[in-house]
Image: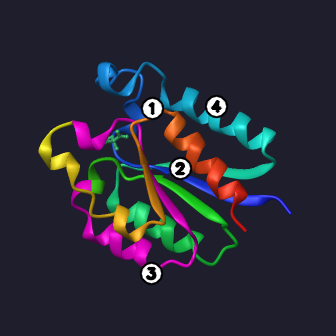
Amino acid sequence: MRKKIVVIHGPNLNSLGTRETEIYGNISLSELNAILLSESIVKEIELAIFQSNSEGEIIDLLHKCDGDGTDGIVINPAAYTHYSIAIMDAIKSMRTPVIEVHISNIYSREPFRSKSVTAGACIGQITGFGYYSYLLALNFLVKQN
Ligand code: DQA
C-alpha cells in the first residue's frame, strides 16, 4: 500500500526563490514542490502538498489529516515555529507522525529563531539542509511502519 504523506509549507514560503535568497536559496516553491513530487514517484508515495500563510488554516489541515488515513506529515511552520502554541497543541493532539523541517539552520541565525515551540510536539526536527530537509523527512516517513 502506498503511504499517504502530506507536506505543509507555512507562511512566506510562497515567496521562496525571491525571498532572502542568500538564506533560502534560489528555488521557488513550485520548483521545490516539483522536486518533492518527483521523489514521491520514485518512492511510490501518495503525496499532497499545501502552503498557507494562515495559522488557522494550518491547524484545520492538521486536524483533517489526523484521521483521514494520512500516514505522516512534513511541516515547515516557518515563523510560527517560534511562537505558535496553537500549532504545537494541534500537533500534540495528533496520532499521525509529524516531522518539522527548516530550510535554514534555525540554530545559527538570530537568537529568537533558536526556539521552536512546535518541534517538541513532533517526532523530530530536520533543520539547515536546504530543500534536502524535506527529502530527508520524506525518506524517514517512507521507512516508518
Ligand atoms: C524557516 C525558518 C524560520 O525561522 C523562518 O521564519 C522561515 C523559514 C526555514 O525554513 O528555514 O520562514 O522555517
Check disc 4 and report its element: helix, strand or loop.
Answer: helix
Q: Which residues, given as a range, are shown in magenta?
A: 82-108
Task: Find disc 2 in the rendering and name its residue.
Answer: 50
Q: In this view, does 139 lie to the left or right of 115?
A: right
Residue 67 locus on image (x, y percent): 63, 78
Q: In this view, does 113 lie above or below 145?
A: above
Cβ–Cβ under 8 Å for marks 4 and 1: no
Task: Find disc 1 in the rendering and name its residue.
Answer: 130
N-term mark: 1 or 2: 2
**Which disc is residue 35 wearing?**
4
Residue at position x 71%, y 60% in the image: 4
Q: For residue 97: magenta?
A: yes
Residue 36, by quadrant, is top right
Task: Find disc 3 in the rendering and name its residue.
Answer: 93
Q: Is residue 5 left or right of residue 81?
A: right
- The N terminus - image quarter: bottom right
Q: For residue 30: magenta?
A: no
- The C terminus - image quarter: bottom right
Residue 104 locus on image (x, y percent): 35, 35
- The reply to whether the residue tagged 4 has its Cβ within 8 angstroms of ligand 1 is no
N-term mark: 2 or 4: 4
Cβ–Cβ under 8 Å for marks 3 and 1: no
- The reply to whether the residue tagged 2 has its Cβ within 8 angstroms of ligand 1 is no
| Label 3, residues with CA under 10 Å away: few <14, some 14-19, many ≥20 | few
| Amino acid type at image mark 4 | Ile
